[in-house]
Amino acid sequence: MQGQHNTADTHKYSVILPTYNERKNLPIIVWLLAKVFTEHDLAWEIIVVDDASPDGTQEVAKELAKVYGEDKIVLKPRAGKLGLGTAYVHGLNFCTGDFVIIMDADFSHHPKFIPQFIKLQKAYNLDIVTGTRYRSTATPALSDAQPGGVHGWDLKRKLVSRGANFLAATVLNPGVSDLTGSFRLYRLPVLRHIISLTVSRGYVFQMEMMVRARALGYTVGEVPITFVDRIFGESKLGADEVIGYAKGVWSLFTTV
């Protein structure tokens, strides 16, 4: 916890990485995370929550723990594919940091943006910092932020994502530009509080987290990020998720 780490930054950062068939991506993302944390003299750990991947993801995680240390790479598998929201709940049980970073393991979210998340959080004492693909500047202001964007998506997927965020912003007025993003920094107690109230599953989960954060009065900042489509494997977004998202927007509108 705060004040207990022999680094320039007195905080410790726990990364929760939900995985399913990420054997090829996991070594890359872990290497990049370790590089960023080491270069910025930050205390860190990575909680790998694997949902019984059949491709050997857990075996790779065990090997990475041997390389980086079992205190740095913490494998906490589950019995099956149980969903993104519950993966974070499961991972939270093993976090020893006072800040938690949630992100995808498929290299869609580059760890190079984490120092900017931390810088913005410190500058304004924020409860949450979220990455956004749809802003050109950070909010509140951060001098060295670069415009966000998306690479590797076709026009159809870009329109779907933009449309989803426009729908949610219009109906829910959440105060952030990228509700469907999943690259965020939370104070540990704030994440515990919000996640205990969140009822959605799947891709609606991230959206509900932001809507509830605003309703609870937590402070939220945004840092522009560049989102890159996954390197290896297939996207898990399908028609069922799109329909579920629309239903989720309506549910949040009527309940939160």
Image (cartoon, rainbow, N blue to C red):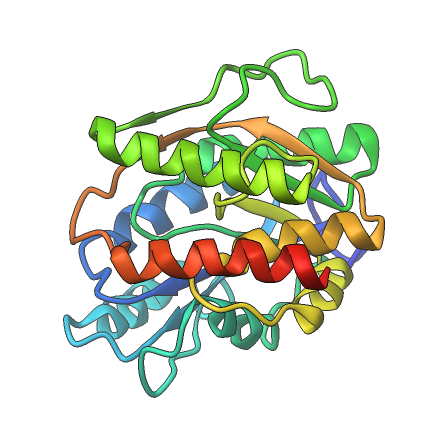
Residue 256 vs residue 70: left or right? right
Tell me: residue 165, above or below residue 119: below
Q: Horizontal and vertical percent for residue 39?
A: 51, 33
- Please indicate, yes or no, whether residue 76 appears anywhere in the rendered image: yes
Residue 31 vs residue 190: left or right? left
Q: Nearer the viewer, residue 83 or 114?
A: 83
Residue 26 vs residue 168: left or right? left
Q: In which quadrant will I find the N terminus?
A: bottom right
Furthest-top residue in view?
143
Q: Quadrant of residue 21?
A: bottom left
Q: Residue at x 76, y 59 (%)?
A: 190
Q: Nearer the viewer, residue 60 or 247?
A: 247
Q: Residue at x 71, y 60 (%)?
A: 188
Q: Nearer the viewer, residue 161 or 36?
A: 161
Tell me: residue 50, above or below residue 35: below
Q: In which quadrant will I find the C terminus?
A: bottom right
Total numbered circles? 0
Q: Residue at x 82, y 55 (%)?
A: 216
Q: Quadrant of residue 131?
A: top right
- Please indicate, yes or no, whether residue 15 appears anywhere in the rendered image: no
Q: Horizontal and vertical percent for residue 40?
A: 58, 34
Q: Horizontal and vertical percent for residue 198?
A: 64, 68
